[in-house]
Amino acid sequence: MDVDKRPGTGWKTVLAATLAIAVTSFTTSSFAGPTLDKIKQRGTIKVGVGTTPGFFSPDSSGKWQGFFIDYGRALSIAVFNDPDKVEFTNSSPQQRLPALQAGEFDVLLSGVTVTITRAFQLGFHFGPTVFYDGQGILVRKDLGVATAAELDGATIGVQSGTTGELNIADFFRKTGKTFTPVTIEDTNEFIAALESGRVDAITQDSSDLVGKRTQLKKPDDYVILPERLSKEPLAPAIAGGDDRWLEIVNWTVNATIQAEEWGITSQNVDEFLKSEDPAIQRFLGVDPSLGQAIGLDPKWAYTIIKTVGNYGEIFDRHLKPLGWERGYNSLWTNGGLLYSPPFR
Ligand SMILES: N[C@@H](CCC(=O)N[C@@H](CS)C(=O)NCC(=O)O)C(=O)O
C-alpha cells in the first residue's frame, strides 16, 4: 500500500514525528540539568547553612546536626543513595544569597524565606516550605518590656541580608513609632551586641532566636516577645535553570511529609514493605514503576525514611528538645499547613 496516498497521512506523519522529537527532547532535558550535572561530577552536594541550634550546628565531634541538615542528607540520598555525599558550609545571611547565585552552593538550607523579590530579582526557585516561621524580637528582661509596641525609641539589632531588615522598619512605620536599627552581618557580633547592651533587642526569625537564646551566657535574662512581625515560610532555595534539580528538592521534602501522613517511620518502614496499598508499594519502591518513571532509584523514598525519618521524626529529633510545638508545621490532617501532593 502506498501510504502517502491515504488522506491525511502526510501531515499526521509530520505531526507524529514532531511530537516524537518534542517528547524525546523533553524527556532528555527533564532528566538532566546544569546543577545536577555539576553535583554528579563533583560527587557531593554543596549546601549553605547557618549556625542555629536545632536547625544546623556542628556537634562536639564537628558533625553537622539539625532539622535542615537532615534535609541535606535526604537530598544526598535522593541523588547518591548515600546520606553523606553532602558538604555543609556556614555562610552569613548577607553572603549566602549571592553565593547561591554565583553557583558556590547547589542549595541553601539556611532558613531562607520565600519572597517574591528573591524569586523575580534573584531568580531563585524554592522547594516546599519546610518550616512556617515568623519574625520575633528578643529582649533583655530588665528592659521591662512586654510587647513590641513598647519598644518605642529602642535600639534594635538586625542581621544584614535578612528579611528582618525590611520587616522591622515596616513594623515601626506602620505603628507610628521610632527605633534605631543597628545592622550587623556577623552572627557572633549580632549576639554579642545584645549581651553587651549595645542594642536593647535583636530581631530575627523566631526559629533563629529560640536556638540562639540557648547560646547566650544567661538565657533566662532574655525573653522573646509574643508578637510575630511577619510570615517567614522557610524553604530550600536553589538557583534557577535546572528543573530536574528543583523537582528532586521538591519531592524529597514531599516524601518526608507523605510518609508522616501514611504513618511510615524510620522504625516501621520495613513493615510497610509488606503493605497491600499500591500507592505505598510505589512510594517505597516495592513496585519499582514510579522510581523508574522519574529516573530515581525506586528505593529513594524508602532509604530517606529509613535513614532520616519522616517529617515528624525530623522535627521531634531536633526541634522538640528546644520546646517547639508543631503548630502550623503540623500535617494538614492535623490542622497544619503541611500537605504533600500525591506520589503517583
Ligand atoms: N528567613 C530570613 C532570615 C534567614 C536567617 O538569617 N536565618 C538564620 C537561621 S534560621 C541565620 O542564618 N542566622 C545566622 C546564622 O545562623 O549564622 C531570610 O530569609 O532572610
Image (spheres, grey):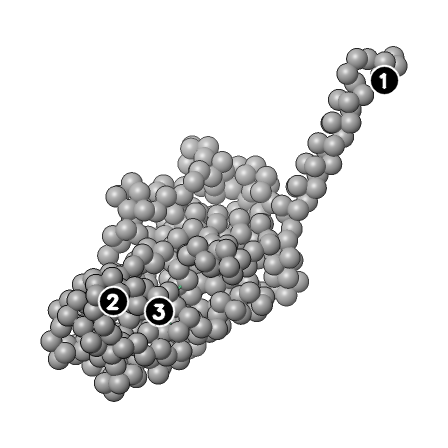
Q: Is residue 123 above or below residue 97?
A: above
Which residue is disc 1 drawn over?
A: 4
* Mark 1 surroundings: few (<14), some (14-19) or many (≥20) residues within 10 A: few
Residues 144 and 314: in front is 144
- Inter-mark Cα distance, 1 to 2: 75 Å
Residue 281 seen in the figure? no
User: Is residue 205 rendered to the left or right of residue 25?
Assistant: left
Decide: marks 1, 3 in contact (CB < 8 A)?
no
Q: Residue at x 25, y 61 (%)?
A: 174
Residue at the limit of the structure toward the left, as seen here: 144
* Mark 3 surroundings: few (<14), some (14-19) or many (≥20) residues within 10 A: some
Going from N to C along the chain, the mark reached first, 1 or 3, is 1
Going from N to C along the chain, the mark reached first, 1 or 2, is 1
Q: Residue at x 30, y 68 (%)?
A: 169
The three-letter code of the residue at mark 2 reads: Phe
Tag 2's secondary structure?
helix
Which residue is disc 3 drawn over?
A: 165
The three-letter code of the residue at mark 3 reads: Glu
Tag 1's secondary structure?
helix
User: Is residue 325 rendered to the left or right of residue 315?
Assistant: left
- Inter-mark Cα distance, 3 to 2: 11 Å
Residue 11 pos. (x, y %):
77, 22
Going from N to C along the chain, the mark reached first, 3 or 2, is 3
**Tag of residue 172:** 2
